Image (cartoon, grey):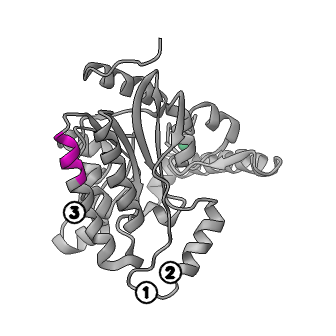
Amino acid sequence: MEENIRDGRPIISIIKKLRRFKKDFKRMNAPEGLFERCNGCGDLVPKNKIGERFYTCPECDYHFNISSGDRMNMLLDEYKVINRTYKFINPIDFPGYKAKYKENRKKSGLREGILTVEGYLNGIKLVAVALDNRFFMGSMGSYIGEEITRAFEYAGKRDLPILIFSTSGGARMQEGIFSLMQMAKTSIAVERYGETKNLYISCMTNPTTGGVTASFASLGDIMLAEPGALIGFAGARVIKETIKGELPEDFQRAEFLKEKGFLDEIVHRKDMKEYIYKLLKLHGYRSCKG
Ligand SMILES: [Zn+2]
């Protein structure tokens, strides 16, 4: 302890803490809703700055979760929603599912955790799908499985490329085996779509886990992710307990997965539109406008 005091570390850390407290205190007393706590660096950052930077932190580049609608608005010139055939089902009569569904619906303003559109990216026509983790953590139940399958069929029939942004807690446990079945169903849909020789770009965003990682999200012709995204099947704690060993520090992070060859590229959100545009052009897709 004495040694630590002598080299000045505790004093520096106290000063640092005090500075941060002062900064936070000032911001906390600003009008409500102007700041947001960043999960990356822990700072309170002005919401307008985050918005200007495609919902990333100006201090540390942390990518905040965004809604499926914001995702489409950021990427596409224009679009129309397709495949909306939603009907609530409780296939295994899971107790409390309907009530929880209603609660999620009220809280998020969404009907389900997925948005499928047909639109244009810099004039190139495509089908785009985004999961939305404000609704049941973007977990895949029968409905999401069906909408993903239909999106592939729709794109395949029209010779369009497809782009899927995943964010998910995995299979929807309230639907039991019916949600697990969606893994096989969506994987077959990807396979059939592949026979049409069109391009499927999968982009994994924070977090993509469980049955979504273990099915369509990992089957892209091109695999992208956003920086720092947590991507995995089982949670790190479960794996650690199972193998009874230590895990690498950046385990299940996009950067680690790219190093191991699971991802083709990690793309910052601000560069995503241009990057996808280049990929589409490289694969022979052309602007239908002008
Ligand atoms: Zn930050």
Residue 162, position as x, y percentages in the image: 34, 38
Res. 286 in view: yes
**Amino acid carrying mark 3 in the image:** Ala
Indicate whether 177 appears above or below 274.
below
Q: Residue furthest front?
A: 157
Residue at x 39% of width, y 40% of height: 226
Residue holding disc 3:
184
Residue 118, position as x, y percentages in the image: 45, 38
Residue sitting nearer the eye, 268 or 13: 268
Q: Is residue 232 left or right of residue 81?
A: left
Residue holding disc 1:
93
**Amino acid carrying mark 1 in the image:** Asp
Q: Earlier in the sequence, mark 3 or mark 1?
A: 1
- Mark 1 vs mark 2: give the one in front: 1
Q: Earlier in the sequence, mark 2 or mark 3?
A: 2
Q: Disc 3 vs disc 1: Cβ atoms closer than 8 Å? A: no
**Amino acid carrying mark 2 in the image:** Tyr
Q: Disc 1 vs disc 2: Cβ atoms closer than 8 Å? A: no
Label 2 residue SS = helix
